[in-house]
Image (spheres, grey):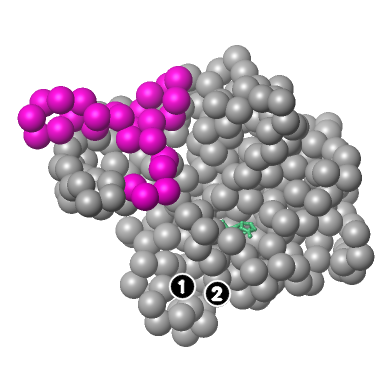
């Protein structure tokens, strides 16, 4: 691939060495990671970019990726079935929340399935993409976008109500490399545990879950429902909601589903 690498770093975590490919600018770190994974790059390769020109969010949204953010993707080759990939989403989100809270003493929370909010505003999102061949998972790209050293005035007006950055909250810049290392350390720790200890990871995830026990409004297509979030299904990752008529509804992370928090 002919994209100029700005720098190649080697990071050692828990005696494992990881390669970090650090770019000045790319279209999307997930795109680069996918191409490299196709070329055979190993599990644990990390692609970081200072800016993205075509950063992608979930639901085919664009992801605002100016300088000052932490935009990166990790190549994983897990031995799990495609329907277990939600476990990676959860452990990634948990890793991010814990890194933020431990490093900066903030109260980051999880908005199911994998948004990270502080004071109700989004500070980080996760976009995981997979390659499945003959029903088998070939690789997973964990794409993480965090608003770190981005001042308020740099956000487009329409994002200012719903998004924030660590700089806005802490009133100072934070060292990106320290944050990246802490997140990676958490991710690779939970990743090494996911097979035998997913229930424990899920329990930790639920401790940071903003919606648990709250009332929510769910919009699916033209249909609106209100209910109370009861739990997360450990087999599928679906949100379990008790509706006002006492029926239970499982919500999967589907594209046309919007969730609004009514009470906390
Ligand atoms: C979301 O919609 O909440 C997920 C946003 C994920 C953005 C990150 S930034 C690094 C990686 N590259 C992308 O193009 N997207 C993800």
**222 to 3, vertically: above or below:** above
Numbered-mark total: 2
Report the mark closest to the observer, 2 or 1. Answer: 2
Which residues are drawn in magenta?
A: 232-257
Q: Which mark is on residue 150?
A: 2
Q: Nearer the viewer, residue 183 or 36?
A: 36
List the single residue furthest toward the bottom. 153
Answer left or right for 174 relative to 110: right
Q: Nearer the viewer, residue 108 or 135?
A: 135
| Residue at image coords 47%, 45% | 114
Q: Are marks 2 and 1 in contact (CB under 8 Å)?
A: yes
| Residue at disc 2, secondary structure | loop
The answer to if 247 sits in the magenta stretch is yes
| Residue at disc 1, secondary structure | helix
Residue under label 1, please give it: 168
Disc 1 residue crowd, few under 14, some 14–19, many 20+, Cα 10 Å: some
Q: Nearer the viewer, residue 171 or 129?
A: 129
> Residue 220's spot in the image, x, y percent?
28, 46
Question: Distance from label 2 to label 1 (Cα)?
Answer: 7 Å
The answer to if 20 sits in the magenta stretch is no
**90 to 64, vertically: above or below:** above
| Residue at image coords 47%, 60% | 123
The image quadrant in which ligand 1 is located: bottom right
Q: Is residue 89 visible?
A: yes
Answer left or right for 14 relative to 3: left
Quadrant assignment, res 63: bottom right
> Residue 32's spot in the image, x, y percent?
77, 56
| Residue at image coords 46%, 80% | 156
> Residue 239's spot in the image, x, y percent?
34, 33
**240 to 31, vertically: above or below:** above
Q: Nearer the viewer, residue 215 or 250?
A: 250
Asked if disc 1 is less than 8 Å from ligand 1, the answer is no
């Amino acid at each position: 691939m002919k994209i100029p690498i700005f720098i190649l770093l080697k990071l050692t975590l828990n005696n494992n060495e990881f390669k970090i490919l650090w770019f000045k600018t790319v279209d999307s770190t997930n795109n680069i990671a996918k191409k490299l994974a196709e070329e055979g790059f190993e599990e644990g390769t990390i692609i970081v970019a200072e800016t993205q020109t075509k950063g992608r969010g979930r639901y085919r949204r664009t992801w605002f990726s100016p300088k000052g953010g932490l935009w990166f993707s990790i190549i994983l080759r897990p031995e799990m079935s495609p329907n277990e990939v939600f476990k990676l989403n959860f452990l990634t989100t948990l890793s991010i929340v814990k890194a933020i809270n431990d490093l900066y003493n903030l109260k980051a929370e999880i908005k199911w399935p994998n948004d990270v909010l502080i004071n109700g505003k989004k500070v980080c999102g996760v976009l995981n993409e997979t390659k499945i061949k003959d029903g088998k998972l070939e690789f997973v790209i964990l794409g993480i976008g965090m608003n770190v050293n981005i001042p308020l005035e740099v956000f487009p007006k329409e994002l200012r109500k719903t998004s924030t950055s660590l700089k806005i909250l802490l009133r100072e810049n934070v060292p990106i490399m320290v944050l990246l290392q802490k997140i990676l350390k958490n991710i690779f720790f939970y990743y090494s545990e996911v097979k035998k200890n997913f229930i424990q990871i899920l329990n930790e995830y639920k401790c940071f879950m903003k919606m648990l026990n709250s009332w929510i409004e769910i919009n699916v297509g033209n249909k609106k429902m209100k209910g109370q979030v009861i739990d997360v299904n450990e087999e599928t990752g679906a949100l379990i909601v008790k509706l006002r008529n006492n029926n239970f509804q499982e919500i999967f992370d589907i594209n046309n589903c919007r969730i609004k928090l009514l009470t906390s």
